[in-house]
Amino acid sequence: MEINAFQWVVLIAIYALLLKKFFKLLRLWYKGSKIPGSSACSHCPKNLTELLSEEHKKYGSIVKLWLGPTQLLVSVNDPVLIRAILEKAEDKLPFTGKAFRLAFGPSNLFASSSEKVRKRRELLTTELNERLLENNYLITKVVDIIMDKLENIKARGSLDSRLVSQHMAFSIMGSSFFGDGFLTWPKAAIYEELLMLTAKDACFWASYNVTPFWKQGFWKYQCLCKRLKCLTQDILQHCKKNCKLFHHIDQNVYGEKSNIKTVTADGAQCCSGADSRDCFFFHKLNDNHTATEEPSSNIMRVIFHGCQQIEALIANVLTMLAMHPEIQDKVYSEITMAMKQQSKYEEQDVYRMPLLLATVFESARLMPSGSLLQRCPLKHDLSFENGVTIPAGAILAVPVNLVQTDDSNWGSDATDFNPYRFLSNVRKEPDVVIDVPFTGSGEESTKPGFSSLVLKDPNENAAFLPFGSGRRTCVGQKFVVQVVASLFASLLKKYEIRPNSGSEVEVKLSSKNHHLLQHLPCSSIVFVSRDS
Ligand code: HEM
């Protein structure tokens, strides 16, 4: 048989590619052999965190674990080293991208390559921080609507804290990103259900190496994804309709921040300055999207990530307050004291409630929503001062819940709920007041009516990682902390949160075993009105 020149070229190219892959693998094996740890994960118990905990005890702060012949996981549990590594390591593992690509379509916002995400990360950070400062009224409105909804469902008795938290998180994300029109959007409930369902099944379908086109279930799943996309377009249209400035947005970009309503030529009322910025935000977020990207996928990804994470945080704070009535009472006193000083409650007031903010941080520390932070040096090895090299292609993992509940990082009460670890007493230790967005100023705290406690910057402790760290850290941290604290300030002013007697949460939380804390069941809680 005669082989022509073209076929030779193809054959050589394939051969060269295979050879390159083989040498990469040899290199991974060789470099991996120098990292301490068990050679293989053949005896993997169900819980990877438990295994990593044992390995770290045996081999030190950097351990390797072969997940398969071609998959090397390197786990690091020393906070100072973690900070240094995450400052350098920029790329993420492509797998998570695959799951979300399937659910929401291709998007560059959470891409594995840092190059692709940089611009949009910056945009999102600016937007969130500006929105945070300008949109005070919106948070108050969201909280009011959530409180009204609570009034209605509370009549039925105890509530599943996960479900309540999900509704709250969804209202916060929806209204913050689409404007307050979202709060009256008739399809919001369907959208919430569909978003959660689609994302839940994404990992299952993404776990197939070859997309299972032959399975009927897969096509049903694709239909759900399509419906979700249509609904996202629908709310965007709704947003655009309410916001006639969209088409001449360029004239208004970041310039005018007036809230005065204007009237267009066709007589329709234009949205306020704040609303036009909402529209502009999405316009910009999808600006210059590449051919492979879909306009609504970035939006769905952000909304989903925010909902999922905020939901977990709210549920954790609810659970912790329900289980620690003595802390709840103190937070309540702090809220009433701070609110007494103001004729009108402003969102910035939460910065005068250090115990409330510390409660949010402590809940995030004890029960982080993800158990591993991961990076994947795609092109280059990562070398560190202590002589350790993490080879390109290895999965770098940070076992967040181990680091966040380790005695050596947090003291002997590391597994206890103690928000005071994030506070210092201004009168006793005036020099620990730190000038960061989260901390109250020492001067304010000494005025009558203000708390004498001062919040420390939680990020000062390198072992505080609920929002990640380094170049790919979460861009929503400041936004989330302010919104969630505001929500609880309003909630606690009206209600006392109690566990439903005999519910599972009471049993689980009385245990000191921190592994249990990460797997809390749906907990049942009751909101008891303070007026009654
Ligand atoms: C309680 C709420 C939240 C928690 C606990 C949380 C946590 C996280 C974590 C752990 C990461 C990975 C960080 C790392 O690998 O170092 C992350 C990434 C990210 N978060 Fe959040 N997040 C929250 C809310 C939000 C919100 C509300 C937004 C935006 C609206 C947001 C936007 C992002 C983005 C864009 C990334 C990806 C960064 C990148 O890959 O470069 N997050 N978040």
Image (cartoon, grey):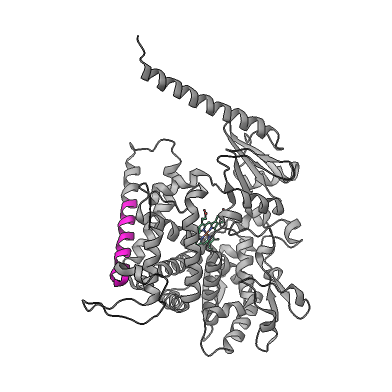
Residue 363, given in percent of the width and then of the height, sits at 61, 65
Residue 69, given in percent of the width and then of the height, sits at 58, 31
Q: Which residue lies furthest to the top in this view?
A: 1
Asked if residue 243 lies in the magenta stretch, the reply is yes
Asked whether, in this view, residue 63 is left or right of residue 486, the answer is right
Asked whether, in this view, residue 464 is left or right of residue 207, the answer is right
Asked if residue 265 lies in the magenta stretch, the reply is no
Which image quadrant for residue 274?
bottom left
Residue 346, given in percent of the width and then of the height, sits at 52, 82
Q: In this view, does 489 lie above or below 11?
A: below
Most frequent secondary structure within the magenta stretch:
helix
- Residue 53 in view: yes
Q: In this view, does 342 lie above or below 241?
A: below
Asked whether, in this view, residue 39 is left or right of residue 143, the answer is right
Instruction: Give the residue drawn at x 34%, y 60%.
Output: 232
Q: Nearer the viewer, residue 183 or 51?
A: 183
Instruction: Give the residue drawn at x 70%, y 78%.
Output: 453
Which image quadrant for residue 304?
bottom left
- Residue 399 in view: no
Residue 151, given in percent of the width and then of the height, sits at 43, 78
Q: In this view, does 450 lie above or below 207?
A: below
Q: Nearer the viewer, residue 359 or 510?
A: 359
Q: Which residue lies furthest to the left in this view?
A: 266
**Dividing the image into 4 quarters, which one contains the N terminus?**
top left
Instruction: Give the residue drawn at x 66%, y 54%.
Output: 83
- Give the extent of the magenta segment: 224-245
